[in-house]
Amino acid sequence: MGRHLPVSRQSTSIGRSGEYYVCYLLERVGCEATRSDGQFDVVAVRPDGRIISIEVKTCYTARGASAGFRIGNSSADWFALCIDGKHGPTVLFVRGNDPLMSQTFVRIKTADFTPAALTETLRELAVGV
């Protein structure tokens, strides 16, 4: 029989996997990124030297046509909403000042997690467009 992690450790592992994946994505677009156990989940330095903070929210799987994320209270520059799905992770970056991020819980359509949206928001995050 397989061993299962306790729910709290499993949640921590899922969250950390999202944080590491976001670091990987940021590194690929020229940012220096590191996972942090501080005020924000990820701190990155853009190619122009600007420091940005990212709060990563990861859910294990989408339910139906949407995924839910507990947002909490964060002053991060960006949020990275990550679905750790059965076919690999997918991410949607959202600006921290987006009114949607002021809610304590958000539900996002999985159809919004597109490669084009990821490419566009990563470029915006890395270059500051």
Image (tube, helix red, strand yellow):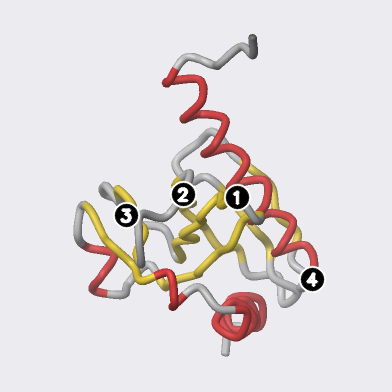
Contact, CB < 8 Å: mark 1 with mark 4? no
Q: Amino acid at mark 4?
A: Gly
Decide if residue 2 is on the left or right side of residue 65.
right
Mark 1 = which residue? 86
Q: CA distance from mark 3 to mark 2?
A: 9 Å
Name the spot of residue 31 as percent of width and height, x first.
74, 66
Tag 3 secondary structure:
strand
Q: Amino acid at mark 1?
A: Lys
Mark 2 = which residue? 61
The residue sitting at 32% across, 54% down in the picture is: 68
The residue sitting at 54% across, 33% down in the picture is: 37
Decide if residue 37 is on the left or right side of residue 79.
right
Considering only vertical position in the picture, is 70 above or below 80?
Answer: above
Task: Give the number of the mark in front: 1 or 4.
Answer: 1
Please name whichever residue, 32 or 83, is drawn nearer the observer in this view of the structure. 83
Task: Give the number of the mark in front: 3 or 2.
Answer: 2
Q: How many marks?
A: 4
Mark 4 = which residue? 30
Mark 3 = which residue? 68
Name the spot of residue 46 as percent of width and height, x first.
69, 70
Tag 4 secondary structure:
loop
- Dot 2 crowding, Cα within 10 Å, few <14, some 14–19, many 20+: some
Tag 1 secondary structure:
loop
Decide if residue 94 is on the left or right side of residue 118.
left
Q: Amino acid at mark 2?
A: Thr
